[in-house]
Amino acid sequence: MSMSSNKTDVELLIAKCVGQRVNIPDLFVLCPWDVEVSPRDEELEKEVELWRSRWINDPTSLKRNRIVDPCLFARAAAPKAAFHELVIVSKWVAWIYYWDDAHDFGDFNNRPQEVITHRKQTIELFRQSLFNKSSSCVDPATISPNYLTAQSVHEWGAVVGEKSVSPSLKNWTFKVFSDSCTAISRLQDEFDKGNVLDLDIYWKIRMDSSAALPTLAVILVADQVAFPDWFFEHELVIKATELADILIWVTNDIVSARYELQCKHVDNLIPLLVHHKGITPQEAMDEAGRVAHQAYLDFEALESQLIHLSESHGISYEMRRFIASCKFECTGIFHWTYHVKRFLPWEPGMDRGSVSVVLGEDLPS
């Protein structure tokens, strides 16, 4: 299949979507797993704010990162984690939004060589931070002299390496982290070229650019569970992670289409469905909701196979924790999505089924 490289196509697509009011499906209807949130902890908030003070020196980026509320994300996506493990998850969330927002909000627009350099330095620094037995020997400024977004990976990446209790999880963490950074950079390249991606190409990239899998990996590190060497290469485990990934990225595309169109980005499932299927933005929202719900149903159907696999290999506890972490990641992110002031005009007590946004416009103040 081909990609259209005519910039006018992007402009026309944006015009079809911007200004359209759309109803947002209730994420907990699409995926009605339980949500659990650990209590707010001021010490956790302080740890993340100290991380920001060391690494984010741009006032606009700092404001965006505070709005993201990484601690709430961590407390909802990893509700069973102890304090020090919650710090790791929180710093990961703060970091990935810092790194990704540099692409979403134009820091690397029309600077293709810098995008490549930034990505390569980030991955290399994470590799050294994760696998070096003496993380204090790793100098972030030497590996990435020009990018605080890359340097800041070391502080939490080294702790992930120290806390990983199984080589299989550490290796998988590095793989999915690298894939995610590469995919985010790929989307930046497509944006700079003015491409409207084909749906199948976008789907493949988005499975990685969502960062759902490295987030799951960090949550599993926080769980402090040792997985066997074969675990993350087994087809059923891979399928489970893919379904959780679909649930997360499709629902994220639903709720983030408003501000991504505001940033002139069409690398989002909603405008791409409008473009390729000739449907309205609301119809695209509804179709995306069906995709997410089907992923939930497929995960539910897969669960018995995962349990059978674990029983036959004597890893019932490890599998139960894995399944629970997949579910908590999804519902934790849903809970976080409703509570942060980044995506939706929702307030506690509101009916989640009555939420609507105007694509490409600010949230009402």
Image: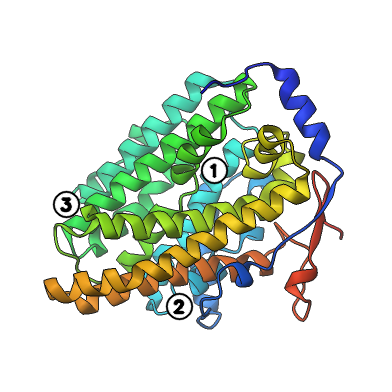
Indicate the position of residue 212 as horizontal and vertical percent values.
45, 54
Q: Report the mark closest to the observer, 3 or 2.
A: 2
Q: Position of residue 19 (x, y in %)?
A: 87, 43
| Residue at 72 percent of width and 37 percent of height | 263
The residue at which mark 2 appears reads as 79
Q: Earlier in the sequence, mark 1 or mark 2?
A: 2
- Distance of mark 3 from mark 2, alpha carbons? 29 Å
- Label 2 residue SS: loop
Q: Callout 3 environment at 10 Å: few (<14), some (14 to 19), or many (20+)?
A: few
313 left or right, relative to 358? left
> Disc 1 designates what residue?
100
State the quadrant of the C terminus.
Answer: bottom right
Q: In the drawing, does residue 183 fall left or right of residue 22? A: left
Q: Disc 1 marks which amino acid? A: Asp
Residue 167 locus on image (x, y percent): 17, 56
Q: Secondary structure at mark 3?
A: loop
Please report the residue visible at 76 percent of the width from the left and 40 percent of the height from the top. 262
